[in-house]
Image: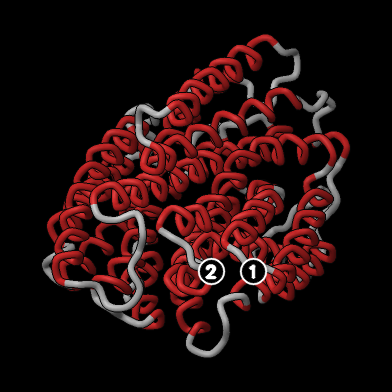
Amino acid sequence: MTTTTPAPSGTYSSLRAAWIPLAALCLAFFVEMVDNTLLSIALPTIGRDLGSGTTALQWVTGAYSLTFGGLLLTAGSIADRFGRRRVLLAGLAVFGLLSLSVVFVTTAGELIALRAALGVAAAAMAPITNSLVFRLFDDKALRMRAMTLMIVVGMSGFVLGPLLGGTALAHVRWEWLLVVNAPIALIACVGVRLGVPADRPEDLTKDTLDLPGALLSITTIGLACYSLTSGVEHGWLSAITLGSIVGAVAAGAAFVGHERRTASPMLDLRLFSNGTVRGAAIAQVGTSIAMASVMFGLIFHFQYAYGWSPVRAGLANLPIIVTMIAATPVSEWLARRFGHRVACLVGAACLAGSLAGLSWGVDHGYPAIAVSMVVMTVGLRTVMTICAVALIDAMPSNRTSIGAALNDTAQEVGSSVGTAVVGTLIAALVTTQLPTGAWSSPLVASFFHGERITYAVLAVVVGLLAAGGALTLTNSRATEEPG
């Protein structure tokens, strides 16, 4: 097939034939992922402009991840019922319009609210883009290549955010970092409308929407992440912190109980009896904790401790971008040569080792940090690719959006936890109020000490999560998990 018209079954016979929908879906995924980190490079600028402290800046990034992660399962569930393309187009439209409203923001609270709303819109985009890419092809090899392309694009967006943001900040105000999302979302809308076939009724589920399950999942994730911030602000034994922790545990227990009893669960917990599903989700949490914590922590490291400009701080992430592309054949070779389980264990070792390396390297100069970035990216590239494809392929045909949503939820929960842990530990170990201007030598030394402890703790946590998840995968040496 040489045209962009899909086959009668609604699928394409090559990546080239599907270039319009594939490009549109990749663009939609890119803008959603880049928005995760685009503002991170501007946090010092935003803090000075809006008079915000560490905690408020943490929530500028955390609010997006929080609502995004909390609503992914709900969005995937809605898409599997009402149409994936329809939900994606709605999400893109709302995302673009909300991005334009940043010009009216005057306080940190308003920015946090806007970021939370953008997370809601993005939740209607991410799992559907992955699910639709999976459905563009019947051939499993093409599915693998398309999913690999999506993951590379998404991770590139996540990492390129600071670089693009830093470059833009040299010429425009920080608000333009969000305004630019509007035309990108419009282009993606056109491409999806032209190239992605409408969902067939037989590919959708007729189950009713699980609204109580959605509410309970959002409550659980929200209270759990808020408790980390509250512990620093109000004390770990304060009533509000303890209440948040108890509320998160209670909501989580209620969610599990409800999903087991309801006839149409948002997330069928029986899926987790499948080792591939369970292990892939756990490992994805670990990878995202690693990536988000490093991206968030090093922004402050480069701009405050080193005093670098936003552009230079963004360029400092280049080792991640280069390795992300270069590591693709390495990850595929590991999977073919040793099987999914061993390949993911190697990736888990890279993640834990890189965080341990950062714990040592933060006060040994940029070359030590860059080496840790490279090792971390090899681990991310290996674990994320294998687990994403395996998880979605293990789902029933009318639950691919939920499968993609589960994968993305695991990643976003990890991102929220990673950002919250770094922000919380730095605030607890160093300072809760970022000083303006150059940092004093004692404060820089204190910051390095806080980073050493933070990354050492995360090395253990990430290593256990990623390795524990990898151990439940199969030993298949193929590039696909068995369906």
Crowdedness near tag 2: few (<14), some (14–19) or many (≥20) residues, C-alpha within 10 Å:
some
Residue 343 pos. (x, y %): 31, 43
Picture quadrant of residue 216: top right
Give left or right: position of 444 versus 94. left
- The three-letter code of the residue at mark 2 reads Leu
Residue 74 pos. (x, y %): 70, 36
- Which of marks 2 and 1 precedes in the sequence? 2
Up-down relation of residue 324 to residue 179 (above or below): above
Foreground residue among 402 and 49: 49
Crowdedness near tag 1: few (<14), some (14–19) or many (≥20) residues, C-alpha within 10 Å:
few
Look at mark 1 in the image and give the residue it sits on.
106
- The three-letter code of the residue at mark 1 reads Thr
Residue 450 pos. (x, y %): 21, 53
Foreground residue among 139 and 251: 251
**Callout 1 touching callout 2 (CB < 8 Å):** yes
Up-down relation of residue 351 to residue 240 (above or below): below
Instruction: Report the quarter where the C terminus lies.
Output: top right
Look at mark 2 in the image and give the residue it sits on.
50
